[in-house]
Image (spheres, rainbow, N blue to C red):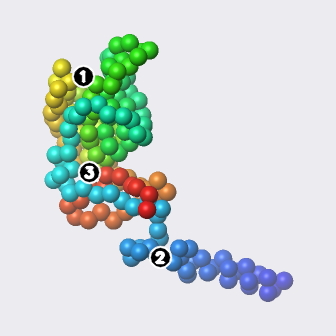
């Protein structure tokens, strides 16, 4: 009985001494199944743009505002659909905003979490242009990998996504 308890204790404690995966290739003692995607801070802050519509690859949350649908393309942006006829919504524009996963609209201002930043934008009434009216840097925590790991973000970079290794 004593030998079984000692064996059980050794097996339990060995997990504290030796990491399960032998360490990551980036010097970390753990390894995620995903790798971080970074952008330079300057490029990140100017990456927001209004583009022609495109197909939805990985849909996130859906927002209804007036006669429009806003469909999040997780960590990439928002598709805008004209929903005047709900039985036949029409894709009209795409807001490219790397790192975005959520939004809210109030008084015609669109508030977006763009990675760690909160931005406020205004769309022109003809949906041909947009203006960033405010940016608050680093208000949100850095996004975790889908399997729950943090990343080291180098100075001057912003973590905008995680992709499979």
In the image, residue 117 lies at what x, y percent?
26, 46
The residue at which mark 1 appears reads as 107
Toward the right, the furthest residue is 1
Judged by depth in the image, the label closer to the viewer, 1 or 2, is 2
**Quarter of the image that includes the C terminus:** bottom left
Q: Is residue 86 above or below residue 104?
A: above
In the rendered image, residue 143, in percent from the top left (x then y), is placed at: 38, 52
Q: Are marks 3 and 1 in contact (CB under 8 Å)?
A: no
Q: Secondary structure at mark 2?
A: loop
Q: Secondary structure at mark 1?
A: loop
Q: Dividing the picture into quarters, in which one does residue 47 lie?
A: top left
Residue shown at 30%/63% (left/top)? 153
Judging depth in this view, the residue of 22 and 4 nearest the camera is 22
Task: Give the CA separation, mark 3 to mark 1.
Answer: 24 Å
In the rendered view, tell whether residue 130 sits above or below residue 98. above
Residue 18 placement (x, y as % from top left) = 55, 80
Residue named by callout 3? 138
49 in relation to 144, above or below: above
State if disc 2 and disc 1 touch (CB < 8 Å).
no
Residue 23 disc label:
2
Q: Is residue 165 above or below residue 95?
A: below
Few, some or many C-alpha atoms within 10 Å of disc 2 (few <14, some 14-19, many ≥20)?
Answer: few
Mark 1 vs mark 2: which is more N-terminal? 2
Of tags 2 and 3, the one toward the viewer is 2
58 left or right of 139 in image? right
Could you tell me residue 26's position as x and y percent? Answer: 38, 73
Q: With 146 as the anchor, is 68 left or right in this view?
A: left
- Ranked by sequence position, the earlier of labels 2 and 3 is 2
């Amino acid at each position: 009985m004593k030998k079984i308890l000692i064996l059980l204790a050794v097996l339990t404690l060995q997990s504290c001494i030796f990491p399960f995966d032998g360490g990551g290739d980036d010097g970390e003692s753990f390894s995620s199944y995903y790798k971080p995607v970074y952008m330079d801070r300057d490029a990140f802050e100017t990456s927001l743009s209004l583009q022609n519509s495109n197909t939805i690859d990985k849909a996130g949350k859906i927002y209804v505002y007036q006669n429009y649908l806003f469909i999040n393309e997780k960590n990439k942006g928002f598709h805008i659909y004209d929903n005047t006829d709900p039985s036949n919504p029409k894709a009209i524009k795409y807001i490219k905003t790397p790192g975005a996963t959520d939004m809210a609209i109030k008084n015609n201002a669109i508030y977006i979490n763009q990675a760690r930043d909160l931005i406020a934008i205004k769309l022109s009434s003809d949906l041909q242009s947009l203006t960033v009216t405010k940016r608050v840097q680093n208000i949100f925590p850095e996004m975790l990998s889908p399997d729950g790991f943090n990343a080291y973000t180098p100075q001057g970079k912003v973590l905008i996504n995680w992709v499979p290794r």
